[in-house]
Amino acid sequence: MVGLKYSTIVVFVMAVVVVIMMDHTAQAQVCSTQLGNLNVCAPFVVPGASVPHPTSECCVALGALNHDCICNTMRIASQLPSLCNIPAVPCAAN
């Protein structure tokens, strides 16, 4: 079950990377590498994960992200449901 959730996150990140690459090829190559480096954070961010805190590798990868890269990724990710003609994904704060 966790493997399926991890796969879903990886597919999502890769889809976002493809969208970014279409907009800004040179910048997107750097951004996609930075986003790919975030895969080390999957054991922490996958719902139901047993890892209570991010690893130092995750923190280093997150710290290395260009602010424009992460902001554009979040902006694009938030638009995906409407672009795919599906309902928005409501998130509750826990």
Image (cartoon, rainbow, N blue to C red):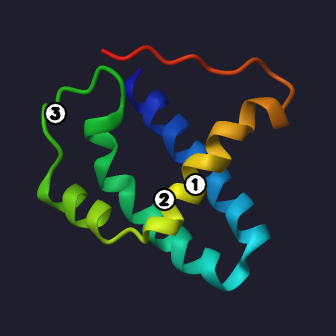
Q: Type of residue at label 2? A: Ile
User: What percent of the width, then of the height, locates residue 81?
Assistant: 74, 30
Q: Nearer the viewer, residue 17 or 64?
A: 64
Q: Is residue 74 above or below residue 51?
A: below
Which image quadrant for residue 57?
bottom left
Distance between mark 1 and mark 3 Cα atoms: 24 Å
The circle drawn on residue 73 is 1
**Mark 1 secondary-structure assignment:** helix
Q: Residue at x 43, y 71 (%)?
A: 66
Mark 3, residue position? 51
Q: Is residue 47 above or below residue 21?
A: above
Q: Nearer the viewer, residue 4 or 19?
A: 19
Which image quadrant for residue 84?
top right
The quarter of the rendered structure image containing the N terminus is top left
Q: Type of residue at label 3? A: Val
Residue pushed farthest bottom? 26
Mark 2, residue position? 70
**Mark 3 secondary-structure assignment:** loop
User: What percent of the width, then of the height, locates residue 63?
Assistant: 27, 66
Q: Residues within 10 Å of mark 2 (few under 14, many from 20)?
A: some
Q: Residue at x 67, y 51 (%)?
A: 15
Mark found first going from the N terminus, 2 or 3: 3
User: What percent of the width, then of the height, locates residue 72?
Assistant: 59, 58
